[in-house]
């Protein structure tokens, strides 16, 4: 199933890292071929959440997906915490598939510039984005 086969959705991508060559930014950049990402913000994630949650809450009733890259657990603990925050914000997260990239385990997932190079991880990211698209359309009644 290709993204182009279904109606387009608007995607805003937020990154929690300001580091040059950030793996998180690499994941976002890798999603661009599948969707037209309206905004790729590298502002600290907490600030973006705080500002957008002020009345009126811009996050309310929005579908969402979380992807992360990190050490042994691939950012899984951060994903769990963000899901908890999302309950308060009235965000609606997809449940499956999940993507927590263990960035430092073989095979190499990112190049020296933080670009995603692992084909299996790219395919998993595509699955997450297609699931987000389907969930978004379902919530919109389409």
Image (spheres, rainbow, N blue to C red):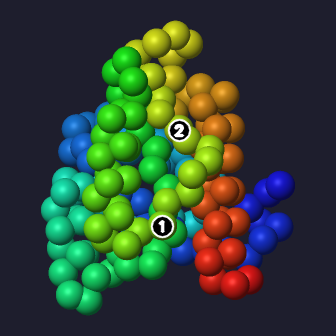
Is residue 115 at all visible to an observer of this figure? no
Residue 71 image offset from top left, x and y in percent: 34, 21
Residue at the (52%, 10%) spot, across then down: 106
Q: Judging from the image, what secondary structure is the residue with disc 2 in?
A: strand
> Which residue has dot 1 on it?
92
Location of residue 14 with respect to 119 vertically, above or below:
below
Residue 89 image offset from top left, x and y in percent: 31, 71
Location of residue 68 with respect to 136 vertically, above or below:
above
Q: Is residue 46 left or right of residue 69?
A: left
**Which comes before the other along the chain, label 2 or label 1?**
1
Query: What mark, if any, has residue 24 been given in the picture?
Result: none
Q: Nearer the viewer, mark 2 or mark 1?
A: 1
> Which residue has dot 2 on it?
99
Residue at the (37%, 18%) spot, across then down: 72
In the image shown, does 18 or 86 lie closer to the viewer?
Answer: 86
Is residue 107 at all visible to an observer of this figure? yes
Q: Judging from the image, what secondary structure is the residue with disc 1 in?
A: strand
Q: Is residue 54 left or right of residue 61?
A: left
Q: Is residue 134 left or right of residue 42?
A: right
In the image shown, does 75 or 16 lie closer to the viewer?
Answer: 75
Residue 63 image offset from top left, x and y in percent: 51, 69
> Where the N terminus falls, by quadrant?
bottom right
Cβ atoms under marks 2 and 1 closer than 8 Å: no
Residue most extreme to the top: 106
Location of residue 43 with respect to 72 vertically, above or below:
below
Residue at the (66%, 29%) spot, across then down: 119
> Where the C terminus falls, by quadrant?
bottom right
Residue 135 image offset from top left, x and y in percent: 64, 67
């Amino acid at each position: 199933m290709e993204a182009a086969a279904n109606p387009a959705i608007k995607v805003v991508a937020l990154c929690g890292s300001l580091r040059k060559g950030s793996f998180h930014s690499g994941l976002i950049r890798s999603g661009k071929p599948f969707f037209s990402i309206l905004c790729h913000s590298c502002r600290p994630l907490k600030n973006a959440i705080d500002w957008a949650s002020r009345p009126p809450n811009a996050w309310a009733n929005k579908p969402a997906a979380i992807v992360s890259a990190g050490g042994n657990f691939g950012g899984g603990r951060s994903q769990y915490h963000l899901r908890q925050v999302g309950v308060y914000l009235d965000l609606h997260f997809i449940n499956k598939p999940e993507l927590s990239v263990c960035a430092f385990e073989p095979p190499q997932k990112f190049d020296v510039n933080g670009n995603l190079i692992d084909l299996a991880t790219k395919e998993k990211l595509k699955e997450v984005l297609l699931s987000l698209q389907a969930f978004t359309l379902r919530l919109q009644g389409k």
